[in-house]
Image (cartoon, rainbow, N blue to C red):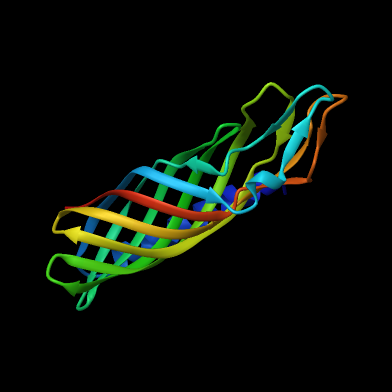
C-alpha cells in the first residue's frame, strides 16, 4: 500500500468515527471554521535547496495555508467537544500542496463568549508541486498539527489558533542534472491562524 493510499484510508476511517461520535452524543451543532489568514513559519525551510548547475532555488521561511473545516460541536457542561474534517492549500514561493485534515478538540468556556482549548489534526499533504523553474518531484505525505485555540463571540465568533505543524515531503530530482540538498522537504514549524467560527 502506498503512502498516499494509507493516508486516504486513515482520513476516511477517522471521518467515519467522527460522524459516529456526533450521532451517538446529545446536543450537537454543525460547526464551520474558516481560516483565511494562516501563516506557517518553517523551522528548517532554508536547509532544502535544489540546483540544475546554473541556478539554485529554495523556499521562503513562511508559507500561507488558508483552510476550511466542517464538523460537529457536541455540547458538554463545560463547553464543546469538536470533531472536524477540512481542506485547504499550502502556498509558498516554491511549493504548493492540497491539505486535507481530520481532527478533534475541546473548546471550554473560560468566561461568557470567551472559549479556549486544545486540538489535534491529522494532515494529508496531497499532490505537492515544486513551483519553480527546476524540475523536482515531491511525494504526498501524512503529517499532523496540534495546538491551542481561542474563540471570542457566540454563534458567529472570531477564532485564533496557535499550532505546531509537522509535515515533510520526500523529494528527488525530476530530470538529469538536477540535485537536491536533502531527501525530504521539511515544512514543519509554527502556524498562526486567524479566522471565523460558526455554530448553528
Is 88 in front, or is 159?
A: 159
Q: Position of residue 142 (x, y in %)?
A: 61, 52
Q: Specify the quadrant of the image occupied by residue 180.
A: top right
The residue drawn where x is 28% and y is 63% is 150
The residue drawn where x is 18% and y is 66% is 114
Q: Position of residue 172 (x, y in %)?
A: 79, 37
The residue drawn where x is 73% and y is 46% is 184
Is 89 in front, or is 48?
A: 48
Q: Position of residue 93 (x, y in %)?
A: 56, 32
Residue most extreme to the right:
176
Q: Is 47 placed above or below 80 here? A: above
- In the visual, does 138 lie left or right of 157? right
Is 173 in front, or is 85?
A: 173
- In the visual, does 72 lie left or right of 165? left
- In the visual, does 12 lie left or right of 26? right
The residue drawn where x is 32% and y is 49% is 194
Q: Position of residue 147 (x, y in %)?
A: 43, 64
Amino acid at each position: 500500500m502506498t503512502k498516499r493510499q494509507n493516508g486516504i484510508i486513515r482520513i476516511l476511517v477517522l471521518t467515519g468515527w467522527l460522524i459516529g461520535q456526533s450521532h451517538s452524543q446529545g446536543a450537537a451543532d454543525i460547526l464551520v471554521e474558516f481560516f483565511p489568514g494562516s501563516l506557517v513559519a518553517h523551522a528548517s525551510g532554508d536547509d532544502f535547496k535544489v540546483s540544475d548547475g546554473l541556478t539554485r532555488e529554495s523556499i521562503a521561511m513562511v508559507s500561507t495555508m488558508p483552510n476550511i473545516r466542517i464538523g460537529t460541536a457536541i455540547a458538554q457542561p463545560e463547553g464543546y467537544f469538536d470533531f472536524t474534517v477540512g481542506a485547504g492549500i499550502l502556498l509558498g514561493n516554491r511549493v504548493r500542496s492540497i491539505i486535507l485534515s481530520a481532527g478533534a478538540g475541546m473548546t471550554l468556556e473560560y468566561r461568557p463568549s470567551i472559549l479556549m482549548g486544545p486540538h489535534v489534526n491529522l494532515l494529508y499533504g496531497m499532490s505537492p508541486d515544486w513551483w519553480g523553474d527546476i524540475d523536482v518531484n515531491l511525494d504526498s505525505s501524512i503529517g499532523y498539527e496540534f495546538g491551542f485555540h481561542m474563540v471570542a463571540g457566540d454563534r458567529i465568533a472570531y477564532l485564533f489558533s496557535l499550532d505546531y505543524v509537522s509535515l515533510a515531503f520526500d523529494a528527488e530530482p525530476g530530470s538529469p542534472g538536477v540535485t537536491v540538498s536533502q531527501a525530504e522537504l521539511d515544512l514543519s514549524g509554527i502556524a498562526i491562524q486567524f479566522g471565523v467560527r460558526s455554530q448553528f
